[in-house]
Image (cartoon, grey):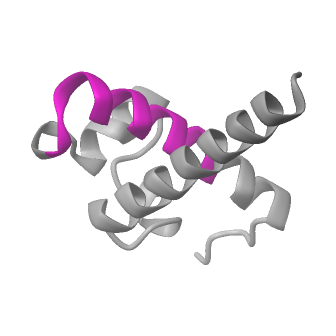
Amino acid sequence: MARPSLRPDEIESFRERLCDAAMETFAEQGYEAVTLRGLAEKLGCSHATPYRYFADKQEIFAAVCALGFDRFADALERAARGI
């Protein structure tokens, strides 16, 4: 049986949740300790689910880094505007 297609907002929502969980885990345990199986467990989903959204741990790490840089840039912009 084929998996149902996911809407773009569902894909983005899960990717964000996975990145948030990964960011926390990378920060707490380091890169080597993070596994997709562990992230799936943390999110309460099948161990295979993260592979529907990311190719591997490196791709998740790259997304987490990009998210971190985006948040840092936003903080710098707010600070520059005095917000």
The spot of residue 2 in percent (x, y) is 61, 77
Viewer-side residue, 2 vs 31:
31
The reply to whether the magenta stretch includes residue 18 is yes
Residue 9 shows in the view: yes
Residue drawn at (64%, 50%), measured in percent from left and top?
Answer: 70
Instruction: Reply yes or no: does residue 30 show up in magenta.
Output: yes
> As rendered, which of 31 and 75 lies closer to the eye?
75
Left or right side of 64 for 14: right
Q: Is residue 36 left or right of residue 45?
A: left
Instruction: Quadrant for the N terminus, please.
Output: bottom right
**Which stretch did the figure color magenta?**
15-31
Q: Is residue 34 left or right of residue 66?
A: left
Query: Going by the picture, which residue comes out furthest to the left?
Result: 32
- Magenta stretch prevailing secondary structure: helix
Q: Is residue 41 above or below residue 69?
A: above
Q: Tell me which residue sits at (72%, 47%) in the image.
A: 13
The percent position of residue 68, horizontal first and vertical second, equals: 53, 44
Q: Is residue 31 above or below residue 48?
A: above
Q: What residue sits 29% from the left and 36% below the top?
A: 26
Percent coordinates x, y for residue 83 in the rendering: 89, 22
Q: Which residue is at the front of the view, 53 or 78? A: 78
